[in-house]
Amino acid sequence: MSEFTHLDKNGQPAIVDIGGKNITRRKAVAQAIISLPQNILEALQQDRFTTKKGSVFQIATIAGIMGAKKTSDLIPLCHSIGLDHCNLQIELNENREIVIECTTTIESKTGVEMEALTGASIAALTIYDMCKALSHNIIIKEIKLIEKSGGKNDFKRA
């Protein structure tokens, strides 16, 4: 990529013109990783990841899907698109970190990586919100695109 795409010829913010693009099947996968203090992990595991507010992972999954659907309302120059599919997987890894993976798909002229990234981000923020009463020492370590396909430039993180 040799230039920023969200600027017009005068350097002003603009939505990218996708009118001439072909409709293709597009997919994106994003990931967020959360590090929780030991006391929160123990409390969550003891209660099967359920709090007085409900199941932490189920609520985060719903929030992530809702966030992915609202991406264009949150990111000003993002195209408003519908999603064909959005799936969130949340699990505890071998390092005792919560790993959120959001997969989005669509048949469209534009990709869904921002929707996948937003879904993973909102799910992570929801877990933070549901656990912060026990400690604010929660770290959302990273949010990253894992892969995207179906557009002009496919990407897969090694």
Image: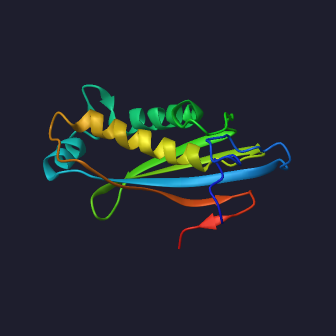
Indicate left or right for 76 with 96 as reference. right
Indicate left or right for 37 with 13 as reference. left
Q: Who's the residue at 61% across and 41% down the image?
A: 13
> Looking at the image, is 89 positioned above or below residue 147?
above
Q: Quadrant of residue 61?
A: top left
Indicate left or right for 142 with 22 as reference. left
Q: Who's the residue at 52% across and 31% down the image?
A: 66
* Colouring convention used in this rendered image of the protein: rainbow
Q: Who's the residue at 51% across and 54% down the image?
A: 30
Q: Quadrant of the N terminus?
A: bottom right
Q: Specify the farthest residue to the top.
A: 53
Q: Nearer the viewer, residue 74 or 17?
A: 17
How far across and how far down the image is residue 47, in percent? Answer: 23, 38
Indicate left or right for 13 with 21 as reference. left
Q: Quadrant of residue 63?
A: top left
> Looking at the image, is 60 positioned above or below residue 25?
above
How far across and how far down the image is residue 12, in percent? Answer: 62, 42
How far across and how far down the image is residue 6, in percent? Answer: 64, 47
How far across and how far down the image is residue 25, in percent? Answer: 77, 51
Residue 155 in view here: yes
